[in-house]
Image (cartoon, rainbow, N blue to C red):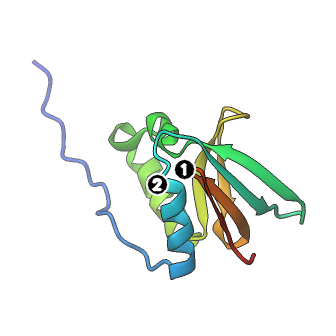
Amino acid sequence: MAAPRKPSRAPAPFAWPVPPELAQKRDLIASAGGRFCGVTFIRKDGTERRMQVQPAALRLREKGPAASERARRATLTRQERHPHLLPVWDVRARAPRSINLRTVSRIAVDGCVHRFAA
């Protein structure tokens, strides 16, 4: 018989304060769910990038509770230090990417186009 497992010491989830304009963009992208969403933003090098994302697809590729304690802490630390970055699944590259919500200028979701001053 296997020894009983120790309870995980995973940190409790914490809601970091997110500025309202970033929360609005985050909610718009998340509202696409399993459907596709087009996002236009300015890259770190100053060029414009258009990305087609599928928000729900990233959740299927995350380890969640199966991840090690170290990986969960790293995720929480990243969220705390960089609330303006949103991890998404890039459909064309078939890989996870991060979008800087501060530089998003356009979000197309559910047939509606939302424009923002970047």
For marks 2 and 1, give the CA distance.
Answer: 9 Å
**Label 1 crowd (10 A; few <14 / some 14-19 / many >=20):** few
Q: Which of the marked residues, 2 or 1, is nearer the chain's N terminus?
A: 2
**Label 2 crowd (10 A; few <14 / some 14-19 / many >=20):** some
Q: Quadrant of the C terminus?
A: bottom right
The answer to whether residue 4 is left or right of residue 48 is: left
- Give the residue at mark 2: 31
- Give the residue at mark 1: 110
The answer to whether residue 41 is left or right of residue 66 is: right
* Residue drawn at point x = 66 percent, y = 36 percent: 91
* Residue drawn at point x = 32 percent, y = 61 percent: 11
Q: Is residue 12 above or below residue 95?
A: below
* Residue drawn at point x = 58 percent, y = 52 percent: 109
The answer to whether residue 86 is left or right of residue 1 is: right
Q: Position of residue 105 (x, y in %)?
A: 73, 68
For label 1, the SS is: loop
Q: Quadrant of the N terminus?
A: top left
Q: Amino acid at mark 1?
A: Asp
Kindly check if marks 2 and 1 are in contact, taking CB atoms under 8 A apart as contact.
yes
Label 2 vs label 1, nearer the camera: 1
